[in-house]
Every structure is written in C-alpha cells, then in structure tokens.
Image: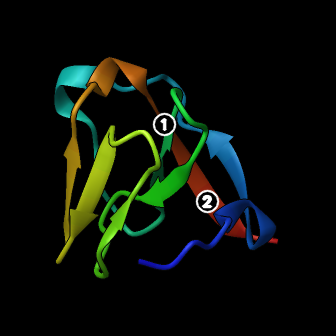
Amino acid sequence: MLNIDLRKIYLFQPVEPAPDPASLPAAGDLYYECLECTTVLNSVPHIKCACPCGNLSGGGGQMKVMKPERVRVVRGKLK
C-alpha cells in the first residue's frame, strides 16, 4: 500500500449537509476522512488502501468502513 498524504495534492471541504453515517455516499471526487487517525482515503479506491487505525480499508472500487460514525465525508479538488 502506498503511503501518500492526499492533503498535499487536494484541497478538502466537508460535504454539507453531512450525510447519514448509515449510508455514506461514494463517488470519484468524494473522500472519507477517518476521525480516529485523520487519514483521508478515496471513497472508491482502485488500489488496496487502509488507514493506520483500521477504520477504513478498501480496494477494487469498494471501501469498508468499520465505524461509520467516525468518518467525515469530504470533497476533494486539486490545489
């Protein structure tokens, strides 16, 4: 897995209104910020990825979220 800090590439803004944790949206420009370890990962990851605390993990276009209430959905735009 690559350890890339996406904050160096993208400017992130929280999605408003905040989506329901039970049904988190996923799209190419949406990212999940783990509130446990502050890692940001794409909501539709095509390569294997995970946050250090294990709350977010995914690959192959699917993201698995262990604690959805501890995730902030953000929209990313290139800096």
Label whose residue precedes the other's in the sequence (2 or 1): 1
Position of the N terminus by quadrant: bottom left
Residue 63's x, y, as percent? 23, 56
Between tags 2 and 1, which lies in front? 1
Left of 48 or right of it: where is 9? right
Q: Amino acid at mark 1?
A: Cys
For label 1, the residue is 34
Asked which secondary structure carries label 2, the reply is strand
Number of residue marks: 2
Q: Amino acid at mark 2?
A: Gly
In percent of the image, x 69 and y 51: which residue is there?
A: 12
Residue 53's x, y, as percent? 42, 39
Residue 40's x, y, as percent? 55, 52
In front here: 76 or 68? 68
Distance of label 2 from label 1 (alpha carbons): 15 Å
Q: How is the image coloured?
A: rainbow
How many other residues sit within 10 Å of disc 1, few (<14), some (14-19) or many (≥20)?
many
Q: Is 72 placed above or below 17 here?
A: below
